[in-house]
Image (tube, rainbow, N blue to C red):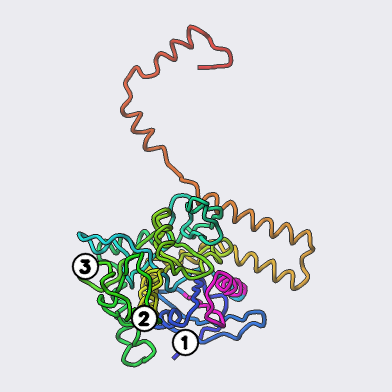
Amino acid sequence: MATKNPNYNVYTVGWICIVSSEMNAARALLDEEHESLPPKPTDDNSYLLGRMNGHNVVFGYPGSSLYGPHNSSHVATNMERTFPNIRFRLLVGVGGGAPRTADAENTWNDIRLGDVVVSNLKGSHGGVLHYDADKFKDNGVFHITSHLNRSPSLLLTATQKLRSDHDFELGQMGNYISQVYSRLARLPALRASRFPGWDRDQLFISSYKHTGEGDCSKCDRAYLVKRLDRESDIPVVHSGLIASGSALMCSAQRRDQLRDEWDVCCFETEAAGLMNDSPCLVIRGICDYSDGHQNKEWEPYAAITAVAYVKDLLRVIHPETVEGTANVVGSLNDVSRALDKGDLEVSQLTTSVDKIHEEQKNTNILERLHLHDFNAEQSEASSESREVTGEWLLVFVGKRKCTGFSP
């Protein structure tokens, strides 16, 4: 039974999903579900409200399951208007993997179906590469002309903490996935969310095209890439660049080119619509290999693994820390409310919006700076100096009596 919590202001985490399997996965792992709030006339999103690892979360999804950056941007814009205290956003769902050459020694390095990819900084890129907004040069080299914002520092720091937890086998992803399995008998809609099995994880060589319609039952298995099965079905988490475009990636050759040139780990279709206006962390469960051999078999399970990762991530983020972070969205909403009441003149509006944008710009600049504390290096250098170090300067000053210099 849903818990009553009729307050738009208590929700601090915004969670965006597009297709039904992504919403079902999120709902299956809620600790507590809240009653819905009355819809606002200017908002055509659908929402699910609840609590997950101490955080009040609003899950937003559009009225239609259409792919593309404009869809996600529309959901985020409405969500931020309706829920004024959102501190950060999460884009959670499924995506296509960019597999690498199989490692016979280590089965954990290559990307498999059901694995999770998390957006992370790579060189000058903030974690998401907008690949179809750019052009291929005549020589076939991919040229980047657009840059998207990075994820909020709070989330990037939390991913590092969670990675350490996983290294020490302290993560809870496996337990959260098991929680979903425990509900399978009661919820027929979730039965497809079970791990399909390694025999259903089929990666064909890049030059082999899909045969027939639908699944790969007519594809020649002689063209499968030979890989060792993993010893466990617990998904592996990968971190790196996620390529986002307006259409699904269905070309193994283009996939491999972007993987090799830009170290892309995953392809999807929504993140580019969010990163500049609503910076977020992107988490994708791998449901296919971004080639012509795509089907829906792995989608429900991949959605579950992505949500299990995010629930584990929220475990290492204290709710008090989230509530103490700046809320630029809230500032913009204050301006909007004042406009509705007629409390702002045009000149005041311009000043208010400019101030908000300037604060956001300064925040982005500060987050890109690499701060370094030189105190430790200075102390170390001082401890290693000899007694007569610098004595020559005093002698020189005494002899030359340099103008404008006072020893």
Give 191 or 311, whichever is nearer the viewer.
191
Residue 51 placed where, x, y %?
44, 78
Q: Is residue 256 above or below residue 222?
A: above
**Which quadrant of the structure image shows residue 201?**
bottom left
Q: Is residue 76 magenta?
A: yes
Q: Is residue 255 magenta?
A: no
Q: Are marks 3 and 1 in contact (CB under 8 Å)?
A: no
- Residue 156 appears in the picture as rendered: no
Which residue occupies 30% across, 62% down?
Answer: 110
Residue 89 placed where, x, y %?
50, 68
- Residue bearing the label numbered 2: 215
Q: Secondary structure at mark 2?
A: loop
Q: Are marks 1 and 2 in contact (CB under 8 Å)?
A: no
- Residue bearing the label numbered 1: 3
* Left or right: 343, with 315 as reference point: right
Q: Secondary structure at mark 1?
A: loop
- Sequence-wise first label, 3 or 1: 1
Q: Secondary structure at mark 3?
A: loop
Q: Nearer the viewer, mark 2 or mark 3?
A: 2
What residue type is disc 2 on? Asp
Q: Tell me where the magenta segment starts and ends, as one range.
A: 56-81
- Sequence-wise first label, 2 or 3: 2
* Left or right: 165, with 399 as reference point: left
- Residue 200 appears in the picture as rendered: yes
**Which quadrant of the structure image shows residue 171?**
bottom left
Residue 56 placed where, x, y %?
48, 75
- Residue bearing the label numbered 3: 228
Task: Identify the image quadrant of the N terminus.
Answer: bottom left
